[in-house]
Image (spheres, grey):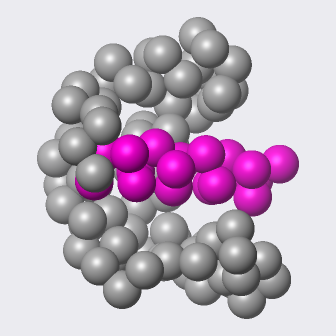
Amino acid sequence: KEDELLAVALAAQKAWSEGGIDDVALADVAAVIGGLHPAYTGGPFNYLRQLGLAALSDRLAAASAEYRQRFAVPEFQPALLERLLKRA
């Protein structure tokens, strides 16, 4: 279950980094209402913020080791994640 939450959150972060999402708060609400992320997480972007950069980096390293394709993180992603987390 946690791996699925992380995968959806990373997909949302990727869409944001590519300019597909302007308002992350609205995207969080839409993801919860649409059933893509459980309400207790507050949505994929809020989920990433709650994890924080250190815990997120640890989770990504562990997930990448187990599921390389699903959780492959390009070199530029950590900088984008840090920027997203600071934006909140």
Q: From what the image shows, is residue 18 above or below residue 60?
A: above
Residue 62, picture quadrant: bottom right
Q: From what the image shows, is residue 53 above or below residue 5?
A: below
Tell me the chief SS of the magenta region. Answer: helix
What residue lies at 39% left-to-right and 25% top-to-bottom? 27
User: Residue 43, position in %: x, y?
Assistant: 51, 30
Residue 63 seen in this snapshot: no
Residue 2 in magenta stretch: yes
Q: From what the image shows, is residue 37 above or below residue 63?
A: above
> Which part of the image, by quadrant, shows the C terminus?
top left
Which residue occupies the foreground of this view, 68 or 1? 68
What residue lies at 29% left-to-right and 79% top-to-bottom? 76
What residue lies at 40% left-to-right and 54% top-to-bottom? 14
Q: Outermost residue toward the top? A: 33
Count how many numbered circles sit on residues in the image: 0
Highlighted magenta segment, given as a residue range: 1-17
Residue 3 seen in this snapshot: yes
Q: From what the image shows, is residue 33 above or below residue 2?
A: above
User: Residue 28, position in %: x, y?
Assistant: 43, 26
User: Residue 44, position in %: x, y?
Assistant: 50, 39
Residue 43 in magenta stretch: no
Which residue occupies the foreground of this view, 47 or 10? 10
Residue 67, picture quadrant: bottom right
**Left or right: 65 as drawn, with respect to 52:** right
User: Residue 1, position in %: x, y?
Assistant: 83, 48
